Amino acid sequence: MFSAIVRVFRTPDLRKKLLFTLAIIAIFRLGSFIPSPYVNFSNVQACLNANQGTTGLYELVNLFSGGALLKLSIFALGIMPYITSSIIVQLLRVVIPHFETLYKEGQAGQARLTQYTRYLTIALGVLQSTTLITVARSGALFGTTSATECSNIITDTSWYAILLMVITMTAGTGLIMWLGELVTERGIGNGMSLLIFTSIAAQFPTSFWAIEQSNGIGTFLLVLLVSVVVVGAVVFVEQSQRRIPVQYAKRMIGRRTYGGNNTYIPIKVNMAGVVPVIFASSLLYLPALVAQFNQPAAGKAPAAWVTWVTNTLTRGDHPLYMLLYGLLIIGFTYFYVAITFNPEEVADNMKKYGGFIPGIRAGRPTAEYLDYVLTRITLPGSFYLAVVALIPLVAFALLGASNNFTFGGTSILIIVGVGLETVKQIDSQLQQRHYEGLLR
């Protein structure tokens, strides 16, 4: 293993890519600590010390921003606007025929879709930065705390100061998007995924240390053991796939023979990745968002439904929250797999190039068989996502560490998935120059 790592840094081209990627990651982390204009950084630090976590409303965004959201830094929005716009553009392919046509045009059409994603990212950046500043001005960014510092985070509330903050945070989102694309073009791995990986991994040491300080070394070791077991299980399932054999008939074109080889269609157990977990988390945050903007004036009691939403749908350890979370993950898994894997398109491509599944006729029967296999394998995949997302919530709640370790299955799935893909890319590039790769 260590000799393989040495070979990585001895290879000039690979070493240059790795160092470039590390430099971009360092710039990304540096921007997370630079405060936006008109932000009182000392008051922000006081609020962070008084509130170790966030409410459920901002947990996911704070997770993907590497903690920059609560610091109100120039990278406060993180990569979340780009993720949201990418998912929206992908879903619009099902609704708008023009988007599907662009997707099938090849590189030129996908470049247009990428441009639409960038424009939508900037628009979402303006919207989300405005919302974030509004919440910060009201003092509700750090939950229900009554500290006066949390109500005086922004030093100037005039219109030009707010406009400058919105422009700064939106520009930070655009810069993050550009940095991610640079890593994809000149570095190792997918740039956006690596930035998300960096944001999540940067918070693990602080969370583990907080658990050790507040709950003791015994709870810390138990939490560490649970994390290792869950990561091992996620690695095993993420590598699992159903291989459907495909044979290609021989074809004579001129004097050459084409085809005649055997291959397979790999259908992973987790075809949807982490997207259903993000969808479910975002949907569960909507009631909390509505409830937060319906808080009563000072001295008045909140409405009954606001109290119920606050006590039920913002707590990760509540049974109803866990039940709704699991059901939404299962439903979104089927939905996302259905729009990303089209059995009819795969069957038509196989028929076009003379491919067939042994024992299955080409064309419509092949599409029905693929749909049958996909439906059956999606069921355990959806339950797997729900269990992985709920295990950390249940385990850390039972251990009394959920207040310090505020993220669970989402972060584990992202870290394992991105880590595996990045290591595979390094291994493939290393095997181009050596007989042995990074993996054994």
Image (cartoon, rainbow, N blue to C red):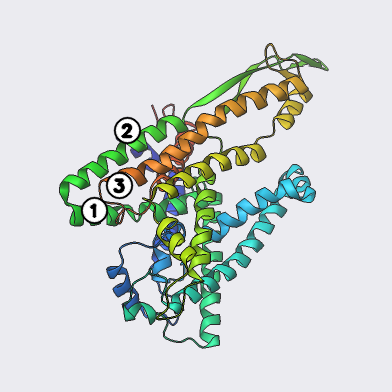
Residue indicated by mark 2: 1
Q: Earlier in the sequence, mark 1 or mark 2?
A: 2
- Residue 55: in sight, yes or no? yes
Residue 437 position within the rendered picture, expressed as x and y whole percent measured from the top left: 42, 31
- Residue found at x 56% / y 27%: 377
Residue 154 position within the rendered picture, expressed as x and y whole percent measured from the top left: 42, 81
Q: Position of 296 compared to 351: left or right?
A: left
* SS for dot 2: loop
Q: Earlier in the sequence, mark 2 or mark 3?
A: 2
Residue 105 position within the rendered picture, expressed as x and y whole percent measured from the top left: 77, 44
Check the image and report above or below for 23 versus 224.
Answer: below
> How far is disc 1 from disc 2 in space, using C-alphas?
32 Å
**Front position among marks 1 and 2:** 1
**Front position among marks 1 and 3:** 3
Q: Residue 343: name its quadrant.
A: top right
Amino acid under label 2?
A: Met
Amino acid under label 1?
A: Ile
Label ID, residue 396: 3
Check the image and report above or below for 243 versus 22.
Answer: above
Q: Residue 242: name its quadrant.
A: top right
- Residue found at x 30% / y 56%: 403
Mark 2, other Cα within 10 Å: few <14 / some 14–19 / many ≥20: few
- Residue found at x 46% / y 53%: 196
Label ID, residue 211: 1
Amino acid under label 3?
A: Phe
Residue 324 position within the rendered picture, expressed as x and y whole percent measured from the top left: 49, 46
**Front position among marks 2 and 3:** 3
